[in-house]
Amino acid sequence: MANAEVRSGTVIVMAENNPYLKRWRDGLKWSPSRSYGPFILYREIEAKGANLTQPDEDLVNDIVALSVILLRKDGLTKRTISVTGSDDISYRVVAYYKASDVLSMMASERTQDLRGSPLLPNSNVDNTPLSRPSQDNQLKLLVENSGINMTKLIKSTLPEWKPERQIKPRRNARIY
């Protein structure tokens, strides 16, 4: 199977019994895997012979220090997890992101909370705005039409997870 062209925000989902999964490559150089909760994390590293840079300390703080491996400056992080779908098929989910995009999105959410209006950062290379998956109408429609039960899917991966409940005001509340 050919290399996939990945960038920050790319998410790839494949059935684990897919014969191409074993041969599938993204074409990038990665650090050794690190466990991070239910996820496996990889950091993009400098290719041999490349113009080497020092690791960005701010981006390494949350991950186990990689002392001998030179991380690529503003490189990608690859996060993988295996989940079982409502169709009882195991899927491998691979997400790619840059720490700078995540920080930018978090800053945007804080700004949105303060001002009450959504602001989406344009920090991608192609200036595509970033948004939460739950705010993506195309993704919502795709999930609805696929018949995937997202609640079951999340609970199968994170059994302690509980969906948020909308709290409705009580009608005809009496004050005594």
Image (cartoon, rainbow, N blue to C red):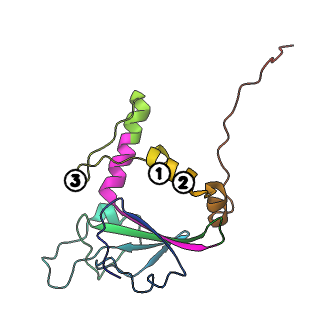
Quadrant housing the N terminus = bottom left
Q: Position of residue 40 (x, y in %)?
A: 48, 74
Q: Is residue 38 left or right of residue 40?
A: right
**Marks 2 & 1, CB-CB < 8 Å contact:** yes
Residue 82 appears in the figure: yes
The percent position of residue 37, horizontal first and vertical second, equals 54, 68
- Residue closest to the far right: 176
Q: CA distance from mark 2 to mark 1?
A: 6 Å
Residue 19 versus residue 45: which sits nearer the camera? 19
Q: Is residue 169 above or below residue 156?
A: above
Residue marked by disc 3: 126
Instruction: Name the residue tied to disc 2.
Output: 143
Magenta region, residue range: 89-108
Q: Position of residue 60 (x, y in %)?
A: 34, 67
In the rendered view, does 96 fall on the left or right side of 163? left
**Is 48 placed left or right of 15 in the picture?**
left
What distance separates the C-alpha of mark 2 from that of mark 3? 26 Å
In the image, residue 149 lies in the stretch drawn in magenta: no
Quadrant of the image occupied by residue 12: bottom left
Task: Please report the residue visible at 36 percent of the width from the left and 43 percent of the height from the top.
Answer: 107
How packed is label 2: few (under 14 Cα within 10 Å), some, or many (20 or more)? few
